[in-house]
Image (cartoon, grey):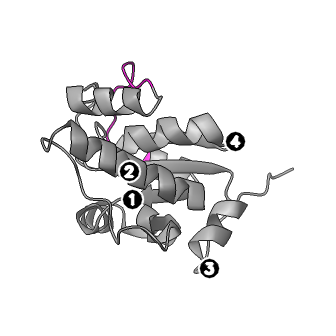
Amino acid sequence: MCSKRYIPSMVSIHDSFAQANSVLFVCYGNICRSPFAEHYYRSIGDKATASAGVGARDGIGPTDDGIAAADILGLNMRKHRSQRLTHRLMEKYDIVFIFDLENKSMIMDQFPSYMYKIFMLADANSNGPDTLEDPYMMGKDMYIRRYKEIAAAIDAL
């Protein structure tokens, strides 16, 4: 018997998320935004989740500022290691959340057949910013701000 697999359509971000069984968060390097989103979602959600980077090198840990900001917000990301986005990951996860237009452009170039399952995470929160830009090398305070925006977007799902 075949298992029924969810395939999102052009419905709202909230409806697509509600119907999905698994969630993938994707940023550029998988060392700042997407690992925080993965860890935050795991602390509150019940769907299978992971994170990856469209330009990531495998095995890199989060930045020191990212770890410190996550600590302040009650999450431990010390054991996280980056992984590059692959066709296998794109196939495995029902819905993929990205953070900015650069992510979208790179994914469109590398994985055009999966565009139907990709959503901008910021679109979940109508009261938040339009995109969730990369805090890389911008200091701990910017990481805290961005992580709070990511958490608010996930909460709004």
Q: What residue does disc 2 label? A: 26
Q: Are marks 2 and 1 in contact (CB under 8 Å)?
A: yes
Q: Is residue 22 left or right of residue 100?
A: right
Overall secondary structure of the magenta section: loop
Please give the name of the residue rendered at 25% of the width and 26% of the height, measured from the top-left corner: 60
Comparing labels 4 and 3, the label whose residue is closer to the camera: 4
Q: CA distance from mark 4 to mark 3?
A: 22 Å
Residue 131 in the image: state x and y as whole percent: 32, 66
Residue 63 falls in which quadrant of the image?
top left
Residue 62, above or below 154: above
Q: CA distance from mark 2 to mark 1?
A: 5 Å
Q: What residue does disc 1 label? A: 98
Work out whether residue 130 or residue 2 is closer to the camera in this orientation and state it: 130
Q: Which amino acid, by three-letter code, is at mark 2? A: Val
Question: The magenta stretch spans which residues?
Answer: 76-88
Work out whether residue 89 or residue 103 is closer to the camera in this orientation and state it: 103
Give the mark, 3 or 1, whose residue is nearer the N terminus.
Answer: 3
